[in-house]
Amino acid sequence: MTVIAVEAGREARRTALILAASQAIIGSAAPIAISMGALAGQYLLAADKSLATAPVTGYNLGVALGALPAAAIIRKLGQRGGFMTGTVVTAIGGLVATLALFHASFWLFAFALLVLGVGGAFVQQFRFAAADNAPPEFKARAISFVLAGGIITAILGPQIVIFTRELFAPVMFAGSFASILVLAAAGAIILSFLRLPAKAIGKVDSVGGDTRPLAEIVTRPRFVAALFCAVGSYALMSFVMTGAPLAMVGCGLSEDDATLGISWHVMAMFGPSFFTGSLIHRFGAERIVAIGLLLLIGCAIVALSGLALWQFWTALILLGLGWNFAFIGATAMVAASYHPSEKGKVQGFHDFVLFGSVACASLLSGIVYNAWGWTMLNWMIFPVAALCFVALGALKMTSLRPA
C-alpha cells in the first residue's frame, strides 16, 4: 500500500510538472491578449475609445463560453486529447487576430480574442486536472504547482509583446498575436508527454458513488462562499488590470512601461504559487482567501495615492498577490466540495459563472475608466472585497451552527 501511495504521489508530481510547463507556454497567450487587447482596440477605433476594452472582454467571454464545452471535450477525449484540442483553438485565435489587425477590423479582432478565450478555457482546466490526479494531501500543492508555471508566463508573454509588437510595422501588434501560433505548437508538444489514459476522466467518473444533482452541490454553503470569493477576486483583478495599461499610457507613460507593469503583475499572480498550497494546507483555505482580499484592498490604497510609475507597478503587484491568495484558496475550497464523480459538471459550472463575471468586469473597466477615470476603478475594490468577507463570515457562522 505504501509503495502504491509513493508511486501515485510521484505520478501526480510528474503530471503537475507537465501541466505547469504547458501553463507557462500556452498561458503566455493570456498576457499578450490582455496587455495588448485594450491598446490594440484603442489603435483600431476611431475617436470614440469607450469600447477599447471590448477585445479583452471578448477574451474573458470566450473563457466563460468555452468552460462547459471544454469540460465536455476533455471528458470525451480524455485530458491529453482534450488539452491538445485546446491548443488548436488557441492557434486559430492567434491567426484570426493577426489577420484582423492587418485588415484594421476592430470587431474581427474582438472575435479573435473571443476564440483565444475559448482556448484559454482549456488552460483553466489544468489546475483541476492536477488536483484530480493527486492524492488528497497533495491537491492544494498540485493546484499551486500548476499555477506556478505562470511565473514563466509573466516573463515570456510581455517580452514577446515588447520584441514583436512592431514586427510587421506599420501594422502594430500583429507580430505579438502571430507569435501565439508558435506558443500553441510548443504547448501541444509538451502536453503530448502526459501519460494519462485517453479515457482517464471517464474512469475516474465511475468512482466515488452516487452523483448528486448539480443544484444540490452548488447551493451548499461552502461552494457558494468559494464561488463568491473566486468571482469577486478574479473580477476585481480583471477590472483593475484591464484598465491599468490605458491609465498608464493616458498618464503619459510609455507602452513599454504599461507592458512591464503587466509583467510585474502576472509575476505576482503566479510567483507565490510555490508556497500558497503549503499555506493552505497549514492554515486553511478560508484564512488564505481573507489575506488575499486584504492585499486587494492594499492595491486600491496604493493606486489611489498617486499616478507615478512606482505607484502603478506597486498597485499591480499587490493586485496579483491578492488574486493568487484569494483565487487559489477559493479553488481549493471548490475542489473540496464535490466527489470525483461530480467534477466535470461542477468545474464546468464554476468556470462558466466565474469567467462570465470576469468578462462583464473587463467590459465595465473600459466604460468606467472612460467615464470616471482610474480613481473610480480602484474605489470599486472596497465594496466587492467587503462582500467577499461577508461570504466568508457567513460560511464560518454556518460551520459553527449545531447540526
Image (cartoon, grey):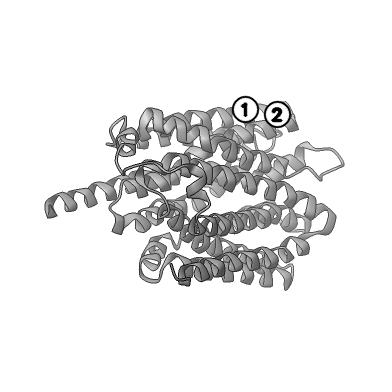
> 358 or 56, which lies in front?
358
User: Can residue 217 be seen?
Assistant: yes
- Give the total of numbered labels: 2
Give me the residue at 59% from left, 63% from top. 319
Q: Which mark is residue 50?
A: none
Q: Quadrant of the C terminus?
A: bottom left
| Image position of 137 (left or right of 285) | left
Task: State the residue in front, 72 or 209.
Answer: 209
- The residue carrying mark 1 is 96
Viewer-proximal residue among 184 and 129 = 129
Q: Residues within 10 Å of mark 2 (few under 14, many from 20)?
A: some
The residue under the point 61% across, 62% down is 316
Say which mark, if any, is on residue 108.
2
Q: Position of residue 258 (x, y in %)?
A: 66, 55
Query: Helix, strand, or loop for circle 2?
Result: helix
Position in image of residue 20 (x %, y %): 39, 48
**CB under 8 Å between discs 2 and 1:** yes
**Residue shown at the point (49%, 48%) measured from the top left:** 216
Residue 81 or 373: which is nearer the viewer? 81
Q: Amino acid at mark 1?
A: Val
Q: Quadrant of residue 188?
A: top left
Instruction: Tell me what residue is drawn at x 61 percent, y 36 percent.
Output: 167
Looking at the rendered structure, the secondary structure element under dot 1 is helix
Amino acid tagged 2: Leu
Residue 242: percent from the left, percent from the top?
A: 67, 51
Q: Is residue 114 left or right of residue 46?
A: left
Binning the other alpha carbons within 10 Å of mark 1 as few (below 14), some (14 to 19) or many (20 upward) gives: many
Query: Looking at the picture, does residue 314 appear above or below residue 235?
Result: below
Using the image, determine if residue 75 lies above or below residue 47: above
Q: Earlier in the sequence, mark 2 or mark 1?
A: 1
